[in-house]
Each structure stands twice: as structure tokens, then as C-alpha cells.
Amino acid sequence: MDLWGVYLFHLITLALLEVILAGRDCLVAGDSCSSDETCSPRLRTLRQCVAGNGNIKLGPGARSQCANAVSALLSSPLHGCQCKRGMKKEKNCLSIYWSLHQSTIHGLDLVESYPYETVQRDYDYVRLASITADSDVGMTTVNRCLDAAKACNVDDLCQKLRTEYVSACIKTTAKSGLCNRPKCNKALRRFFDRVPVDYTHELLFCPCTDTACAERRRQTIVPSCSYESLEKPNCIAQMRICKADYVCRSRLAQFHYDCESSETSANGCKQGNYGACLLAYTGLIGSTITPNYIDNSTSSVAPWCSCSGSGSQRADCETFLGSFTDNICLRNALMAFGSESDQQPTLRQPSTPSLSQNSKESRSTTSPLETLETMRILLDTIIPTQALGNELLFGQSTLPSKSLPNSASPPSIMLQAAFSLLLLLHLLNNGS
């Protein structure tokens, strides 16, 4: 087979894989089950089991009915279905997933995993090409955090969504004088879900050598609006709120899976994937357990909560907090990203991104004047000057379309597509 044949072979293989994986979408699986006279009543029963009043609706034989429904649905298309982070109708997709994956349903223990598609390839963050590349000037020593902000301004999508979340997070209402936290967090989630990691991770994880840089980095997600309060809430209470929300619960499950530590792993991560761990970390931003740098003097991260008043759940609380503050996998992932050489290429038009210690519980000691200066710098880096706009070329959005189908594709169409691709693959192999 010549080079062109090999190229076609890979294209067809990827297309076939897409067809196969489409059947694992929980929205598709849910629609398929709802239209099946055998699967549909069992799914309704399971949803009643999960609901708080399931016992009342199902009567004295509730546990037996739930067990039968689970057993039957484990052999249906619902078992093994997944969702995509940031997809349209994500909450609907996750509700279908968690209906079958509740950790406990009337005494039935089911292994709780996370519903998102696995990151198929590891991003080489240690050697991650900066959003910039070679030019006539060559390699120069730069501030990676500043470069990250400039590079975001060059990309239409990154600049647009970053400006949106900063505007939402710093705007105060005339009545209360406070920001709109739900709106701020929604805009933050949109930014980190839709903008490629080439930009978001450089903004959030760029290395700093002084407190001024570290404070600007800490202010990236506008903590004063997104999560900070006068007193830190209890972590157990925050986890309870998180687990009651399908999206937050899923993001937390993904974080625990992808950032699980291992003493036997070469890099400290059980899954061996720094990129997946950092991606899972950013998935928590904008939730009730938003993590961030705890201050401007270290690179330690943690959610804004404490274990004070945890009572008998103190051990559980410290385990949760330790998954951030005493996590070898997460710490190594952050260090590996930040240890890239300070020798960076000079800025140019962005290239297409790749596809697919217990902490101290004190607030930062930044003074109001320092905070105002930080916000000024933050806004200056988000909104480019006219000179910068004239100097840099603005390109098209680099975000690849990653949304899953919003409705079920007829199985017959999927089978026909798969058959056609296999036939074409067979002809190419015979013709080689």
C-alpha cells in the first residue's frame, strides 16, 4: 500500500471508530432504551429507585425491583455509555449515566466511576509547544504567564470567552454591591470546557518565581467572586452539594480517577497521564469545590474549604482535602508543566492545538491596593491594545467541534455507515 493508501486507511479507521463510539453516547443509549418496550419500563423503575421517594412509589418489594432493573439494564446499551465534558445537554447525558451508576441503590453496591470519555492520548506538557513558535528573532527568555495571556488575546475564541468570564466575575450588582457568583462560575466553566488546553493550561499552570507573578496567576479565575467568602465552609458540606449536582459529581469522580496517586507508578499517577490529571483538575473550576492556589507564596492548590467542625467525619474530610494538598500525582503534574525551560519561542499567530502537606487554611495576605493592581494587570492582558492588535494577526478559532450528537441516530444508519467503511477498507487492502 502506498503512502496515499496508508493515509486513507487511517482516515477510514478513525471514521469507523467514530461510528462505533457514537453508540456509547448516553443520550443515544437513553433514546434507544426509551423506545424499546422491554428496556423502557426498567429504566423508569431504576429512576424511581434513585429518587428519594422510590420506596413509596415501588412499595415493599422496592429492593427486589431495583435489583432486577439494574441486572437487566447492565446488559443494555446503557451499560458502558459515556458523555463528553462540555457537550450540549451534558446534564441530561449525565443524569442517564448516574441512573445506572449510583454508588448505593437500596443497599446495592455499584462501583462508582466517572462518565466522561477517557483521554485517549497524553499531552506532552513537559515538551508542550508554546502557543508561539520560531521566528527570525529566535529563542528568547520570556515570562510564560505573560506570554500565555498574550497568546490568548491572539486567539479569537480564547480572548472572547476569557473576556466574558472576567466581565461576569468583576461586575457587581447595584443593589448588593456583590458579583453574580452563579453567572461567574458558568462563564468560567464555559471557558475551561471550550478553549483548547494549549491556552487554558498555560494561563493557569505557568511557572512563577516571584509573588507578583504568583498572585496574578492566582487571580486568573477571579477568586474573590468565583469561590471566596469571609469564612471557609466545611469541605463535607461542599462535597454534599457537589454530589447532588450531576456535573460537579462527574467532574469530581473524574478528578479522583485521573489524579489518583500511586507509589509504584514511575510518574506518581496510577493512570500515568499528567495531561488527563490537569484536565480533570480544570474541570472542577466553576463548581462548589473550585480548587486554586492557596496563596501567592507557594504552588500548593486546594478548594476553598476546611475540616473545622467535621466531627465524626473528620477523617473523610481530611482525605478529601488531602486529594489536593497531599497528592503526589497532582503535584508532579503541576511541577512537570512548570519545569519546562524558560527558553520559549517568540510570539506569533497561534497554531492548531492538539486534539484529543496538609495545606494552611489562611487567606492570601494581599493588600487591597495589590489586588486592584492585579485586577488592572489582568484586564490589561485580556483586552489587547490597539498597537498589539495591529501588530498581531488574529486567526480563526482553533476549537475543534467536539459536541456529541444531540439526538439518537437510527441504528440502521450507523450500521450502514460502518458496513460502507469496512467495504471501502477491504477494497483498499485488495488494491494494494
Image (spheres, grey):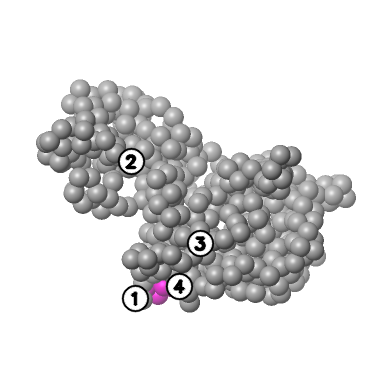
Q: Is residue 243 left or right of residue 221?
A: left
Dot placed on the residue nearer the N-terminal end, 2 or 3 = 2
The residue that mark 4 highlights is 326
Which residue is located at x 88 percent, y 50 percent? 387
Please name the amino acid that badge 4 sits on. Asp
Please name the amino acid that badge 2 sits on. Tyr
Please name the amino acid that badge 1 sits on. Thr
Q: CB of mark 2 within 8 Å of CB of mark 3?
A: no
Q: Is residue 414 left or right of residue 360?
A: left
Which element type, helix, strand or loop, lies under badge 4?
loop
- Above or below: residue 236 compared with residue 250: below
For the magenta stretch, what is the residue range? 264-268
Instruction: State the separation of the CA atoms marked 3 and 4.
Output: 15 Å
Nearest to the eye among marks 1 and 2: give it. Answer: 2
Question: Given the current orientation, which residue lies at the most extreme right position?
Answer: 387
How far across and how far down the image is residue 52, in percent? 29, 39
Instruction: State the separation of the CA atoms marked 3 and 1.
Output: 30 Å
Label 2 crowding class (10 Å Cα cut-off): few <14, some 14-19, many 20+? many
Dot placed on the residue nearer the N-terminal end, 3 or 1 = 1
